[in-house]
Amino acid sequence: MSGLSITLVVLSALLHAVRNLLTKRSGDKQLFVWWYEIWAMVFFLPLFCYLAAVKGLPPAAGLAVAAASGLIHFFYWLFLSKAYEDGDLSQVYPIMRSAPALVLIVSIVVLSEKVSILGVAGILLVVAGVQAIGMQRPSLREFMRPFASLATSRSTRFAFLTMTAVTAYSIVDKIGVGYADPLVFNYLLIVFGVAFFTPYIATTKGKNEIMREWSVNRRSILLNGFIVFISYSLILVAFTLERVSYIVGLRQLSIVFAVLMGGYILKEKHRTLRFISAGVIFLGAFLITVAK
């Protein structure tokens, strides 16, 4: 990977970890996401208008891809919140963040990407580290616990759907940046995503709930409005430079940052195992960065 693409992804991963920390501290996760996506549209409307005037809007095919991405992101937000509603974080989180393995397969089949042995090894190490991050003690049974609960746990099934959505929008967005400037495409997918998300919010949430989330978490919502657009724009720019499987794999460095934040800011339990797992993810990420 080039130095520029590595820098873009690492910065995005750090911002993504901050965004997740703020989301984890919020009340109603669906409303929190809906609010900050709306504010992302507000904050970056001038930039979108400028880029659209200078570079023009994407062709019809590009708009269709942006709409498809917006729809997939809506389902991602929905599945993510459903997985967290009644699921154990250590059980559902590793599954949701295992998308690099699926992205690797789909990118080879759909996009005909060529991935080196070193790149594959790095991606698999990242996935192994992600799976181990939720362990409460070192054992094979504990390592396989998230998958073992698939047949009996509703939240685990939603976690798999979330992973599928991450894979789908990663592939679609890789295609999308071939039609449009990455920042223009990002803004459009947010617009489409909010357009799909808003009717769901309107029919499932009351006005008091909506305003309560805003009044309680206003500062975090506004901060995430900046972060969500900037962090994913960095990924979309990286998509124009490098293979999607490498980008998605390296982006899991956000988990390393999240583990550090969780350990030292939130004082989460099982910090030693999580630090070791984060080290495995970091090693996998390093192999990805040196892969050809």
Image (cartoon, grey):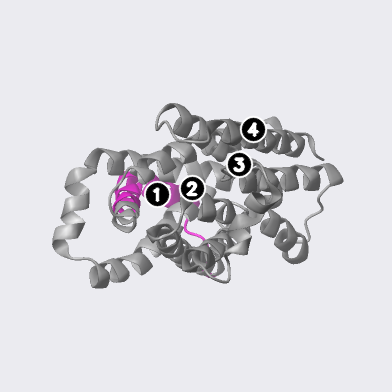
Query: Which is closer to the viewer, label 3 or label 2?
Result: 3
Q: CA distance from mark 4 to mark 1?
A: 42 Å
Residue at 31% x, 70% y: name it.
200
- Residue 87 percent location from the top left of the image: 44, 58
- Residue 96 percent location from the top left of the image: 55, 55
Quadrant location of the C terminus? top right
The residue wearing badge 3 is: 137
Q: Residue furthest left?
A: 208
Can residue 7 be seen here? yes
Residue 76 is covered by the magenta coloring: no
SS at badge 4: helix
Query: Which is closer to the viewer, label 4 or label 3?
Result: 3
Range covered by the magenta-colored residues: 35-60
Which one is earlier in the sequence, the residue at label 2 or at label 1?
A: 1
Q: Amino acid at mark 1?
A: Phe
Q: CA distance from mark 2 to mark 4?
A: 36 Å
The residue wearing badge 4 is: 276
